[in-house]
Image: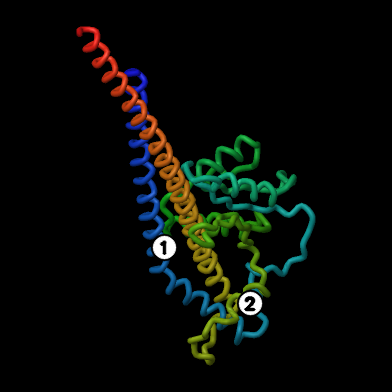
Amino acid sequence: MANNMREIKSHIKSINQMRQITKAMKLISTSKLKKARAQLEVTLPYFNKVKETIADILEHSGDVESKFFDLKEKKEGQRKAYIVLTGDKGLAGGYNSNIIKLAERTIGDDKENVLLLVAGISGRAYFIRKNYNVHTEFDYAVQNPTVYRARKIADIILDMYNKHEVDEVHIIYTEMVSAISLQPRTLKLLPIEIGALREEVRDIEIKIDEKVKYEPSASAVLDVLIPKYIKGIMYGVFVEAFTSEQSARMTAMDNATTNADDMLQKLNLFYNRARQAAITQEISEIVGGASALK
């Protein structure tokens, strides 16, 4: 009986320690999520101004052309690059597995014409193991999304696109719809479908003088602005993926803490019963011994 009680107390101590760890990890994830969102808010005015200028050009410059617009005829065997945002760590429920599954469904069987740029150790290790063509230089951490890192990554894919090494660039990430709803998504980055871009900027309130003349041409200015626009999207998507991972980890840690509480309640109940039985047995033995002495 004494050995069993010591074992139960040991289990209770271990679960209490685990419970403290899961609660701490939830608090850390909450802090990281809020910090990333706050940093994104700081950069929004700049990227919104870029989008506003693009909206003005599309609104007042008539038909404009850009090497970044989807004006080419689709051909067989186009080479596609997919940026896949997974996590560096686990303990986040199905966060990594859900995004990997979406990537595999999106890519299908056409591995030959696909180049993967995988952010996150979990996804990178998986796709290398599955013999996908994984870009070896794309090795940026996803645990601290910054504008600088987003620009570096955007520069890589823009350079590939400008050199015609890839015909299309897509990004696969997780959107934090709400605190309890995370949605894996696919977004086409390049080439930009001008109809979709016009639709996106249509409702922007233009604050630029309509008499502005873009030099040397509206198309040339667009070719400068579009990369900045892509970098803004890249940063926003990285923050979205990062906060989604933190939200998934918060939920996982919250569930783990709840499970630990349930286990503690059952173990404490079992321990108290065992302790009461031991006390009752000890009293019985004392009473029996006293009776024997009489």
Q: Which residue corresponds to the image point at 52% horizontal and 88% vertical from the top-left? A: 212
Q: Residue at x 36, y 34 (%)?
A: 268
Foreground pick, 255 / 53: 255
Residue that mark 2 sits on: 199
| 187 sits to left or right of 139 | right
Taking the spot 49% from the left edge, 51% from the top edge, the residue there is 248
Left or right? Give the position of 283 relative to 101. left
Kind of residue indicated by mark 1: Arg
According to the image, label 1 marks what residue? 37
**Mark 1 or mark 2, earlier in chain:** 1
* Scheme of image coloration: rainbow
Residue placed most toward the observer, 208 or 65: 208
Task: Tell me: residue 216, above or below residue 2.
Answer: below
> Quadrant location of residue 200?
bottom right
Asked if residue 58 is positioned above or below residue 90 in the image, the reply reads: below
Relative placement, left or right, of 40 versus 125 is: left
Work out whether residue 291 or residue 285 is closer to the camera in this orientation and state it: 291
Q: Position of residue 135 (x, y in %)?
A: 58, 45
The image shows residue 284 at horizontal and vertical percentages of 29, 18
Would you place residue 93 above or below residue 1 in this image?
below
Q: Amino acid at mark 2?
A: Glu
- In the picture, which quadrant includes the C terminus? top left
Residue furthest front in the image = 294
Element type at mark 2: helix
Q: Secondary structure at mark 1?
A: helix
Q: Residue 265 at x, y = what percent?
A: 39, 38
